[in-house]
Amino acid sequence: MRLSTRSRYGTRMMLDLAQHHDKGPVRIGEIARRQDMPVKYLEQLIIPLKKGNFIKSVRGPKGGHMLARPPEEITVGQIVKTLESGIELAGCIENPGECERSGRCLTRGIWEDASKAMYDKLNSITLFNMLEMEKSFKMHCSNLGE
Amino acid sequence: MRLSTRSRYGTRMMLDLAQHHDKGPVRIGEIARRQDMPVKYLEQLIIPLKKGNFIKSVRGPKGGHMLARPPEEITVGQIVKTLESGIELAGCIENPGECERSGRCLTRGIWEDASKAMYDKLNSITLFNMLEMEKSFKMHCSNLGE
DNA sequence: GTTAATCTATAGTATTTAAGTATAGATTAA
DNA sequence: TTAATCTATACTTAAATACTATAGATTAAC
């Protein structure tokens, strides 16, 4: 039960954009280098994130990408939901028709509840929250002399 | 982010065993027929569930399988944890060494928290709870004249 | 003590999905 | 006009999942 690399790379890319929010467009190549993720793969992830209005882009030289909304208005849950192919723990949650048992299946309700618990947690965390976490992490390390 | 069929079939098998708890050994073929799941696949799932002391078996004719503990002492979380290959949302939660970033990775903590939220939910549900849900579901249907 | 019904163990295959790569094209600042 | 960037789509490879097959061990019933 792993998240796909799409979600994980996508979240790291969005966090990178948040770290450079309001500093002009960021080239995809920079993000890829900083985060050690393949350029071509990130290019694919950007498409749905643009459709979902999380990223806006500028073409041509000096172009790049930016958050389409402030970091406090974007949650990790939204990013994962956008990039993950199926967002629930079982296919029958999204498409009850795919299993004729779904109307009377006890386990189905369990997977639904567990999916919800996970997404509630992910939706409670914004990119802004993560920037704050980063700040306090760095402060902690400097206190330790690291 | 789907659960594997292992977890889903395994949970349905355990629920079937709970429904026949204290009525002697249940043949794997019966479960497979009732639940419409392949015999050979279930045979594989039984092995780790026996190791985890959730199932005990009797060999030979008239043999079969039973819950090794009462339904109120077995949670869905335990079943899923036993059958799922990797139980966390990211590999780096179980093996921090697999990624050199793990010590300073902000997203890693997020996946850890979300995994926990999901497992807390799954661990809060016992097979006994599910038998109760079944009872009230049936009562509801008979009230509707179904 | 033979038989047949059951579980046990391991190995093999086939399908699907995920991850990553390649190519060609569109846009635009300089 | 050029070169730097994003955009779109198609392809390839690798890994995991789901399932199947074969051979063997155990034991109740006769």
Image (cartoon, coloured by chain):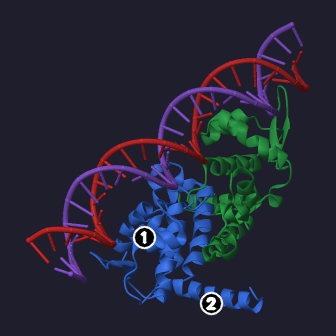
Chain colours: A green, B blue, C red, D purple
- Viewer-nearest residue: B24 or A29: B24
Q: How many residues crowd around disc 2 within 10 Å: few (fewer than 14), some, or many (20 or more)? A: few
Q: Earlier in the sequence, mark 2 or mark 1?
A: 1
Residue A9 horizontal/vertical position (percent):
64, 47
Residue at mark 2 shares a chain with residue at mark 1: yes
Q: Dividing the picture into quarters, in which one does residue B140 lie?
A: bottom right
Residue B16 lies left or right of residue A127; in this view the side is left
Pointer 1 residue:
B29
Q: Amino acid at mark 2?
A: Lys
Pointer 2 residue:
B135
Residue A132 horizontal/vertical position (percent):
71, 61
Q: Residue at x 84, y 54 (%)?
A: A70
Q: Is residue A50 above or below residue B106?
A: above
Q: Amino acid at mark 1?
A: Gly
Q: Residue at x 63, y 86 (%)?
A: B133
Q: Dividing the picture into quarters, in which one does residue A61 lie?
A: top right
Disc 2 is attached to a residue of which chain?
B
Q: Residue at x 68, y 55 (%)?
A: A86
- Viewer-nearest residue: D22 or A44: D22
Dot label at residue A144: none
Residue D2 horizontal/vertical position (percent):
81, 10
Q: Visible in this render: residue B11?
A: no
Q: Is residue B110 above or below residue B128?
A: above
Circle 2: element type: helix
Q: Residue at x 63, y 63 (%)?
A: A89
Disc 1 is attached to a residue of which chain?
B
Q: Is residue A104 above or below residue A130?
A: below
Quadrant holding the C terminus of chain B: bottom right
Q: Answer yes or no: do the residues labelled 2 and 1 have beta carbons within 8 Å?
A: no
Residue A34 lies left or right of residue A19; in this view the side is left
